[in-house]
Image (cartoon, coloured by chain):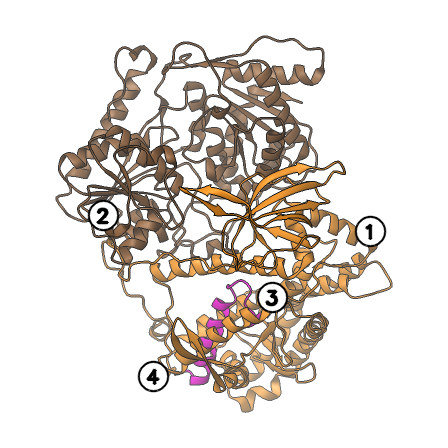
Amino acid sequence: MKQLDVTLAARSFVEGRAIRTTLFRHRRLGDEPLMLVLWQLGAEPFSLAAASFGRSPRDQNFVVAGDPRNRDLAFAALLKMATWFNGHFEAPSADREEFEHWGQILTRSRSAPQIVVANGSTIEMLGRLGRRLAYLRTDGPKAAPLELVRFGRHLLFLSSHARMPGQQIVIALTELVGSNWATGQSPEERLSLAALNAYISPSKSHAFYEAMKSERYAIGPVPSGEDDENLEPLVEAFNQRRSGDVSAKVVAPLLKPIEDHYRRLVGRTWRLAWDCYERETKWPEAPSVGRRWDLDREAYTQHIDWTMGIGRRRTRQTPRQAAILLRRLEEAKATLEAEEACDDALRMIPYLLDGKAIQGRVIQLDLNNRELANTRMVRRPLVVISSPDPCLMPCGKELWWSVNPDGKSYEVTQVRADEDGGSIVTLKLTTSSKSTPMPRVGQEVCFSIHTTGTVRFFKLPPTEPWTHRPEAPVAEPVALEDSEIRS
Amino acid sequence: MNYPSTPKNEFYDRSVLRAATQVSKEALDDFFSSNGRERAIVVSAPAGAGKTELIVDAVGKIRGRKTRLAAATPTNEQAFGLVRRLAIAYPQETISFVPARDIELPPTIQRLPNVQEVSAAQTVGRGVIVGTLSKLGDAFARGDLSSTDALLIDESYQADSSRYYGVGGLAPIHLLVGDCGQLNPFSTIDDPDHWRGLPEDPLQTAVGVLLRNHPSTRVHKLPLSRRLDPRAAKVAQAFYPDLPFSSALNPAVRGMRLLPMTSVRPRERLLDGVLDRAAVEGWAHIELPDAPVLTADPEIVELIAHLFQRLAQRTPQVRCELSTSWQDLRSQRVAVGVSHNDQKDVLRARLDALGYGDVVVDTANKLQGLEFDVVIAWHPLAGLPDPDAFHLDPGRLCVLLTRHRHACIIVGRSGDRKLLNAIPPRTPAYLGWDPDPVYDGWGVHEAVFAATERFRISA
């Protein structure tokens, strides 16, 4: 565990309250997100048992499947949700703007929908539902409604896009809130939105006890064992009374006991999720959020264009696609960490403590320093800063000025300890360009390992090499739906 | 590959050398019997087996047939080393290095008369082309680099599938050489196991994806280590359960001696005990008392700094099969291996302040493929509250404990071995992927603790 994490957790426990660890909100939070609260049966992870969805705390739609192990009942509940979701999710794509990308003029949606869920487990469930729905047949004896298939494809997009560091189309509240607050809880305890929120919400008693009381409640989508035990007789009675009938006319009047059961569970998470969301919206948005939102809008637009056009989604990536995605994810993560640290002084603290950044006041500037590079003398400006902290960086370390993280790097050329326990650090700019911004004498500055400069991706051949192709052709899989019909 | 014969035969275990020479010969015979069909040969070896030497040997034989080849490595540093070895081994051959942007060969290698730094487009007609997998793959994808007849990859267990993809089509015949016990490819992303078990997993090793798609690929196992002497090889065998190997050396060929010193200070007597045991036994494992600590544990930093000071005071000397007279141990031949960059940075600053700027301090990832006379290994589990997948990784411990020729001093805390008395952490299972690095690491750590038990000294 890092020193800062230990210190903040201890301080939070001593003070009996959570401690804010950021000055900003590093995600865009829209006015009318699509809030989704999902519930499954304990042992049925690919089916939706109950859900609430809406765009404001008062706009709470609610569905239950009755017995989600039955395909018709499960799909009937999902279809209600899909119809609502597809309309709201696809609407922003109608309003476009043009932008230039590598010399090409492309269009993207002026806005994008934002899906908010309680936790990462709910995003995983969206992915599982997507896998189940996106590949259903829309013809033949067990034809699925088109709306449901499109819903599945949107869910698959959300599930895969959620992996992109810094994306803002799908927000898991445990991750959003957890990254902004330090509490005296273990990482496992912080996975419960109820417990995390109880530590943050002001209360008269110590936050630890508030959190302890709250973590008893399941937040979904996985129910507590007790909740499912309470549900079991209700579902058994429901199935007996409907006698195999799945028509809405028969089923709807029988759902009341199951609805009452889930209304209590889902309703608790619904209120909690909105409380957490609205609290975070009050913090100012960080400067780099806009750049990442642009990327989100482009990803959303591409998804909609593909889904409304060709529509098919690969079940698996090719080795080439996986390799490219891996590099993109690595790059996005590094850029996100850099942007958050350079935007937010509190986010920079861990790097200062780890010796990956140095802050201080500029005490000397030598803009005309010259040195020999290969065969000629070149300009290499020097910046000398006085830091109140000891500097553990080795000479030669490459750093970037935090106000110009996409600019040229500086190199640590000398580190001296001063008599007050601080340090005098000399940095050399690694370019002679006079257009590079330079700090002023007396200015407070921070230099860190973080850069947001573009990284050149290595290109991959368009065709699969023999090393990555199986010797023998792989057998075609049997469609799940077909195998069900045959059995 | 031919190993040294007379006059130094008495240093080597001849039966081990014979077995290794036979494996090398079979691997190269196999390589040359492909008749132009697309195929690969894998040579798997323990630490210090002379893998790069096998590559160098293969280059000579391939060029003897007037065949064009490309040799690739995962990192720039490894490519630099390979260029140097090839240039020295074959002075009549031009070695063409294709650098990535902002990369250039170190001046000492640049100055070798038969080394040339060229762009990919300038490699047309050249016989030996060297570069990283990323650079050669990129150049090949852009059409700047034309196909070669053979591709040789060093450190191929460190190369990931995505980088191998780039160079896969560069040649019809591949020779992949690597250490199967070292660290697997890694990524900074939050869920690197996302593709685990799937054929498209970009983080499986180059050897892994090759064997998955071409299970008939022959894997030759080099059964020796030339770096590790018999004392070290005995412990290191724990890292290679599927690759029995022996040291190429006879016992007591290598030696390390220290100037005798006495001290009344308990700390210095403790350090002397550690250094003496390392000099005599080849191993010492010093343990500080158990305590909850930070990653860059300041007590361990101080202990390592004091070990260096005391080592320098005692004027260490070494002798070995390459130099039978006692030679002063140079500080450049001493390294500290750590698991985290935090640890590296703090130690680097501390050792610099003490005037040990020449001593190498680096993480296990960066030490892969390097060799030193003496290594101080900061144990990955030192002071941890719970063992996790990162710190249990058997490859990390393997790298830290197999870099030395003479002695390895392990530094940890007394609670480290107790961590393994608890219940192992829960690990996910993946269809199509049997290995479990956490459980493997758990077992390897237990075996290494047992094997180094008699070298343990409590601080």
- In space, the residues marked 2 and 1 are separated at their CA atoms by 66 Å
- In space, the residues marked 4 and 3 are separated at their CA atoms by 33 Å
The three-letter amino acid code for the residue at tag 2 is Thr
- Identify the residue position indicated by label 2 in the image: B123
Rendered hue of chain A is orange
Chain identifier, colour brown: B
- For residue A28, which quarter of the picture? bottom right
Q: Is there CB contact under 8 Å for labels 4 and 3? A: no
Q: Looking at the picture, do discs 1 and 3 lie on one chain?
A: yes
Label 3: state its secondary structure. loop
Local crowd at mark 1 within 10 Å, few (<14), some, or many (≥20)? few
A82, above or below B214, in the image? below
The three-letter amino acid code for the residue at tag 1 is Val
The three-letter amino acid code for the residue at tag 4 is Gly
- Identify the residue position indicated by label 3 in the image: A222
Q: Is residue A9 left or right of residue B203?
A: right
Q: Looking at the picture, do discs 2 and 3 lie on one chain?
A: no
Q: Looking at the picture, do discs 2 and 1 lie on one chain?
A: no
User: Mark 2 or 3, which is nearer the eye?
Assistant: 2
Local crowd at mark 3 within 10 Å, few (<14), some, or many (≥20)? some
Chain under numbered label 2: B
Chain under numbered label 3: A
Label 1: state its secondary structure. helix
Label 4: state its secondary structure. loop
Rendered image: mark on residue A14? 1
- Identify the residue position indicated by label 4 in the image: A140
- In space, the residues marked 1 and 4 are separated at their CA atoms by 64 Å
Q: Is there CB contact under 8 Å for labels 1 and 4? A: no
B450, above or below B345, in the image? above
Visible residue check, residue A47? no
Give the image location of residue A10, x and y in percent. 77, 49
